[in-house]
Amino acid sequence: MSLRALHYTDRVQFECQANPGSFMLESRRASGRFEFVYFCPCGCGLKNRLLIGELHKPTGPRPSWRWNGSRTAPSLDPSVHHIDHWHGWLRDGYWEVC
């Protein structure tokens, strides 16, 4: 299964539509760091957030991901894993199940 990751800039539209795999970016104070807020690609309606770094993997006490910096074809590394729920990759703008 492959699902397109749609980027939203309007929070109200993002929350109301709640499209599986859709995402928003919230800038953090540290340069190049963001919260990647997304709806689970499986369609369950779960909304979650990941700490990401543009072209780097942030360090610290929270798990984090490296983001390629693209809003239209985002990729995250490593894979996104919700234990006992969903596990997959976001590559070149598409969510893919492992």
Image (cartoon, helix red, strand yellow):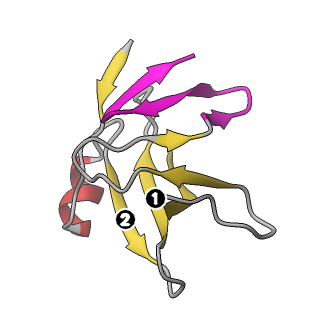
- Residue neighbourhood size for the residue with mark 2, other residues' Cα within 10 Å, grouped as few (<14), some (14–19), many (≥20): some
Report the residue marked by disc 1.
Answer: 36
Residue 59, position in %: x, y?
Answer: 73, 67
On screen, 8 above or below 59?
above
The residue most toward the top is: 1
- Quarter of image, res 4: top left
Whole-number angstrom distance, CA of label 1 to CA of label 2:
5 Å
- Residue neighbourhood size for the residue with mark 1, other residues' Cα within 10 Å, grouped as few (<14), some (14–19), many (≥20): some
Report the residue marked by disc 2.
Answer: 25
Which residue is at a point 60% across and 34% down the rendered structure image?
79
Residue 2, position in %: x, y?
Answer: 35, 18
The residue most toward the front is: 55
Residue 24, position in %: x, y?
Answer: 33, 60
Among the two numbered marks 1 and 2 on one chain, the one whose residue lies closer to the N terminus:
2
Which residue is at a point 66% across and 36% down the rendered structure image?
82
Which residue is at a point 36% across and 37% down the rendered structure image?
21
Circle 1: residue type: Phe
Q: Which residues are magenta?
A: 79-98
Residues under numbered marks 1 and 2 in contact, where contact means CB atoms less than 8 Å apart: yes
Circle 2: residue type: Leu
Q: Examine the structure image and report whether residue 94 is included in the region drawn in magenta.
A: yes
Mostly what secondary structure, the magenta segment?
strand
Q: Name the side, left or right, on which 30 lies relative to 61.
A: left
Q: Quadrant of the C terminus?
A: top right
Residue 1, position in %: x, y?
Answer: 39, 11
Q: Name the side, left or right, on which 54 lies relative to 13.
A: right
Give the numbered dot on residue 89. none
Q: Name the side, left or right, on which 53 lies relative to 27.
A: right
